[in-house]
Image (tube, rainbow, N blue to C red):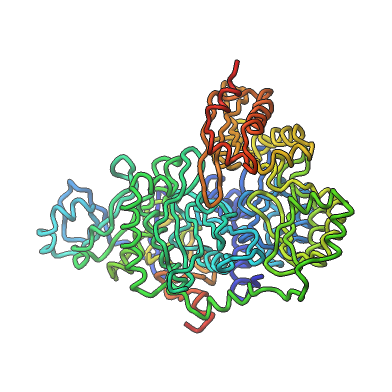
Amino acid sequence: MPTKTHLIANGAVVDDTWVFIDDETPLGDTPAIISLDRLKAEADTLRSRNAKLGVVIRTNTQGKTKLGEDVRELSPYLDMLTTIAIDFPVYRNGRGYSDARILREELGFKGELRAIGEVLFDQWSFMARCGFNTFEIDSSIPVKAFNEALNELSEAYQPAVDNQRGVLWRRHGL
Amino acid sequence: MYRYDEFDHKIVTDRVNQFRGQVNRRISGALSEDAFKPLRLMNGVYLQLHAYMLRVAIPYGTVSSKQMRMLAHIARKYDRGYGHFTTRQNIQYNWPALDRIPDLLEELASVEMHAIQTSGNCIRNVTADQYAGAIADEIEDPRIISEIIRQWSTFHPEFSYLPRKFKIAVTGHENDRAAIKLHDIGIVIVKNDKGETGYEVHVGGGQGRSPFIAKKLTDFVPAKKLLAYLEAVMRVYNMLGRRDNSYKARIKILVHETGETEMRRLVEEEFAKIDASQMLSLPEAELDRISAYFAPPNYENLPAQSDAFEAAKEGNPEFSHWVKTNLVPHKTPGYGIVNISLKPIGGIPGDATDAQMDVIADLAERYALDEIRVTHEQNLVLPHVKLDEAKEVYDILCAHDLATPNIGLISDSIACPGLDYCNLANARSIPLAQEISTHFADLDKQYDIGELKIKISGCINACGHHHVGHIGILGVDKKGTEFYQISLGGSADEKASLGDITGQAFTEDKVVDAVDTIVETYLNLRQPEERFLDTYRRVGMDPFKEQLYAD
């Protein structure tokens, strides 16, 4: 896990105005990313709060098989959320790719979808295709390298969340 | 055969360049071995006991003579003059230098080949019946849908970091030669009662530490919806598959722990959403485009019986034997399907030298409409040979030690690389396969024994398919000594079954005797026309056990 990260959005490094707040700390009136448990427990009061709200979905945390949290539980709260951060505890754990597509395609989430955790060079383009639009990456990596990585594979056979229709369709003008 | 268009070329070329960058970052130290691992794995590069190993994909086991010549060239230029054909219709090179692999991949790309997704926790090379397009009574050539699946699964952004590796196999024939029930997804091409062609989908088969026969999740998915159905299975697996323990991470464990009924419900629910979005509906035009590549080649109009062929058999008992074991009837009159055994007596199962690969390429070009197939039993096939020319083909094969007449017999065994190459193995597999093959070298004896499939794995991961061997042999390690556990009655065909363990394992010096005892027991018990497997299924384990553990 990188010790120091910067946030990339739209191909540039941007200021991160969001703060991750743990379950015990009271929320102020600045943009805050909280846990799924807290969101569910405090949803009523959070609705009347006057600042942007985000949530983080943790993978590999719960129960014997440690699958992690279920993004579909966010469905009743999506209108309250500006940002959803999805945690990749290790790059090998690819559950977050499905989380992202479910949020975008099934639940219609239009806000910021942020990849956090072990978010490495060779995963960025797959993450982008699955609907992530911001990335917390090692701050020693220049944004130029990030943008190049996104374009290493210029064609895709299958449709996903980005605008590529997929070669299997594009061959026929579909 | 399928040919790349501009898109396919671009995708493979981009990948070669990307991997070159990754190798450079690894060599410069910018990338740690740990971070490099998933990247090299997704390009088929393993770190073995002694060196890097490269696995090249042979999609659904089909290669042209030009491609085979390239595989020979690579064996010569980048390896030690040979390659190893695997149980998943791939070829492995055991000695390439890491810094030369990008060049090797670039050469491969020039003949429309690659090593993409031949390892790693992603969707692997799609395998299919090696007799596709050549065998009678096929519902549809399985390579058509296999090629579509290959494309859909290549660099799938959602399914490149799955809980574990994922293998798909397809058969278009009621006789399953692709072991589809031992795959994560097995597809059988079927016709419904309206006469439409579609796909029956089996999920959760596999070997390894916990072997399972796949469960049939659906009887019929039309071509247009198949990708949506597969994506639904994959998503359920990626969301719910276990990641806490790599031995419990394959989809077979998810199916087992979730239950077949609930698994079906989860997949149907996901499928309904994806199907409704129409996002993955396969265009008719694309199905037609890919089908056209697999249209039957231009066969000559020949009589069913070839006088030259009959005369050659008459005059040459060795040729006649080879025909009996290695030549299979073709759907077209006057043609045959020729199996090339890569199991010479005492040889290494699945190995071929660069010179042999070149000979096979020449034979394919001259006699077999330019096609070669790789079988999951580690042999090669010339799918379309004129019976009139079978003897010429045989003579050339003989001259290059490629005409061993043993397909399906006891010396035609499958073996994993084992302790000679692999850092997972407990025991050696190849030397044991060689010993067994030498022990039963006498062809008359082999013909008398008849169909008997021995499959040998050097460890519980079961790369040598021991669970589905008629006789399965598993290498186990006991305090630093190699032991072998034997199982009986396994089968990978349409009546797939897992073998039963005989009992206590055998030491290395006793295992060939044990196989001999099993064979003798069968010969004493068999009824006329009974194969080993039939006898075992009739009489069960007890008589074998009695003989094996008599003292």
Taking B268 as reference, is B327 left or right? right
Given residues B342 and A125, the one toward you in this image is B342
- Coordinates of residue B249 in the picture (x, y in percent): 43, 45
Residue A55 visible somewhere in the drawing: yes
Residue B336 in the image, given as x and y percentages of width and height = 74, 62
Q: Nearer the viewer, residue B95 or B493?
A: B493
The residue lying at 49 percent from left, 37 percent from top is: B209
Q: What residue is rendered at 68% in x and 29% in y?
A: B516
Q: Where is residue B262 in the image (x, y as percent from the top left)?
A: 31, 52
In the figure, is residue B217 to the left or right of B262? right
Q: Against B460, is B88 above or below?
A: below
Hey, which quadrant is residue B138 in on the image? bottom right
Going by the picture, which residue comes out furthest to the bottom? A173
Location of the N terminus of chain B (image quadrant): bottom right
Number of numbered tags placed on the structure image = 0
Identity of the residue drawn at 61% across and 52% down: B88
Q: Percent x, y for residue B227?
A: 45, 67
> Which residue extends farthest front?
B528
